[in-house]
Image (tube, grey):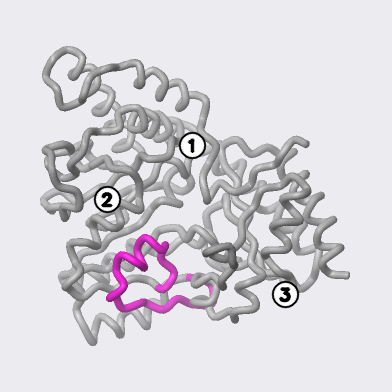
């Protein structure tokens, strides 16, 4: 059975060009910190990738610090504010939620957008040192008004961090226009390799140090650079920028087709965040009365890989904190599914997924 993969928000298939660049980099023996010829060859790979990541996000290369991914990046930034007042949105990724367990949570609306009125009230009552709000939600695809949020944060003299993992390669990403101080990325969400990410920072700021023991990455992140993964990251960033218009048009069409057919499959299905700005590659749904776990297994048996809106822990499904924060109940949160497309998705993939969904929903809704 040929499988259909629609779980790009978990991880995207690696682009062939990325695999080639990783393989080429693995043939270079040098350490990027060495000053001999082999070391300089490795250094060139890292700096070329830095230029490409900078190009994707409209920053200077000097503003890009490589690391192992956004989980490390989020923990790095938040580690500098453990003893300070921090605000985060109620729908952040666990790598933000758990790294800032002391943080006060900003409520969101039924559409999954930060409740700006509630946020302004929080700012009137207390001035945070740092605010962390994601750009695109991994479960719903909802896009936050980061520039507006950043303006409110800056009016209080605070700093703002943005987890942009689900935004890179999917929506236009301009660091300057967002008005943020720190931004985190992961390569594997848009066709790059696992184990490569970056922190972007506003010039003049100091990044909190999370790993100590070396002078790599301008003394901001100790540890020998993962040259091969960084090379792949750079290639993925370059390709994402070059193909953005085609990607956006393609995924927008897929999203419309998916959602129209899903609505026809059962009249009580909810498209989560339907009335909010969303990334064109993401469709999250709630199927009242259905078990996400059962639906996932049934779709998997049909040869289709999708995801649940629930976090899986110790083999059990728990209600998604994102869905519940949006005002849905626990039962609805346990019935959430996510379809996410990407660079390699085809019309045939969408047709296969919808055929499978139709068969599964007809059994579930009997």
Please report the residue visible at 75 percent of the width from the left and 38 percent of the height from the top: 348
- Residue tagged 1: 191
- Residue tagged 2: 176
Please report the residue visible at 23 percent of the width from the left and 87 percent of the height from the top: 125
User: Answer yes or no: do the residues labelled 2 and 3 have beta carbons within 8 Å?
Assistant: no
Please report the residue visible at 21 percent of the width from the left and 24 percent of the height from the top: 31
Image quarter (top left, top right, bottom left or bottom right) of the N terminus? top right
Give coordinates of residue 235: x percent, y percent. Answer: 40, 29
Which secondary structure, mark 1?
Answer: loop
Q: Nearer the viewer, mark 2 or mark 3?
A: 3
The kind of secondary structure the magenta stretch mainly shows is loop
In the figure, is residue 79 to the left or right of 93? left
Q: Nearer the viewer, residue 334 or 281?
A: 334
Decide: is 121 above or below 194: below
Decide: is 24 above or below 196: above
Other-residue count near label 3 (Cα within 10 Å), few / some / many at <14 / 14–19 / ≥20: some
- Residue tagged 3: 288
Image quarter (top left, top right, bottom left or bottom right) of the C terminus? bottom right
Decide: is 206 above or below 125: above
Q: Which region is colored magenta?
A: 90-112
Q: Is residue 156 visible in this depiction of the protein?
A: no
């Amino acid at each position: 059975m040929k499988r259909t993969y629609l779980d790009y928000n978990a991880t995207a298939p690696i682009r062939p060009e990325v695999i080639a660049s990783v393989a080429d980099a693995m043939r270079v023996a040098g350490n990027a910190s060495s000053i001999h010829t082999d070391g300089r060859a490795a250094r060139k790979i890292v700096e070329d990738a830095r230029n490409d990541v900078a190009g994707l996000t409209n920053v200077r290369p000097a503003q890009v610090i490589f690391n192992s991914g956004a989980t490390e990046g989020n923990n790095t930034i938040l580690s500098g504010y453990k003893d300070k007042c921090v605000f985060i949105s109620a729908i952040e990724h666990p790598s933000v939620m758990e790294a800032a367990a002391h943080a006060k949570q900003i409520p969101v609306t039924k559409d999954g957008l930060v409740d700006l009125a509630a946020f302004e009230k929080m700012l009137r009552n207390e001035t945070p040192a740092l605010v962390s709000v994601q750009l695109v939600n991994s479960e719903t695809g909802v896009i936050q008004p980061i520039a507006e949020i950043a303006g409110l944060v800056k009016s209080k003299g605070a700093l703002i961090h943005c987890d942009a993992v689900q935004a890179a390669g999917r929506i236009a990403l301009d660091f300057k226009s967002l008005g943020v101080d720190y931004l985190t990325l992961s390569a594997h969400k848009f066709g790059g390799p696992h184990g490569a990410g970056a922190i972007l920072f506003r010039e003049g700021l100091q990044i909190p140090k999370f790993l100590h023991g070396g002078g790599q990455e301008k003394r901001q992140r100790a540890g020998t650079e993962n040259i091969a993964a960084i090379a792949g990251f750079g290639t993925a960033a370059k390709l994402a920028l070059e193909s953005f218009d085609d990607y956006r048009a393609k995924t927008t069409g897929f999203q419309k087709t998916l959602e129209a057919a899903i609505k026809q499959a059962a009249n009580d299905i909810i498209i989560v965040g339907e009335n909010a700005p969303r990334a064109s590659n993401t469709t999250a749904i709630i199927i009242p009365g259905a078990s996400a776990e059962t639906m996932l297994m049934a779709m998997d048996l049909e040869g289709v890989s999708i995801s649940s809106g629930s976090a899986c822990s110790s083999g059990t499904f728990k209600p998604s904190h994102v869905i519940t924060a949006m005002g849905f109940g626990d039962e609805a949160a346990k019935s959430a599914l996510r379809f996410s497309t990407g660079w390699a998705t085809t019309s045939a993939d969408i047709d296969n997924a919808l055929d499978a969904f139709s068969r599964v929903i007809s059994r579930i809704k009997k």
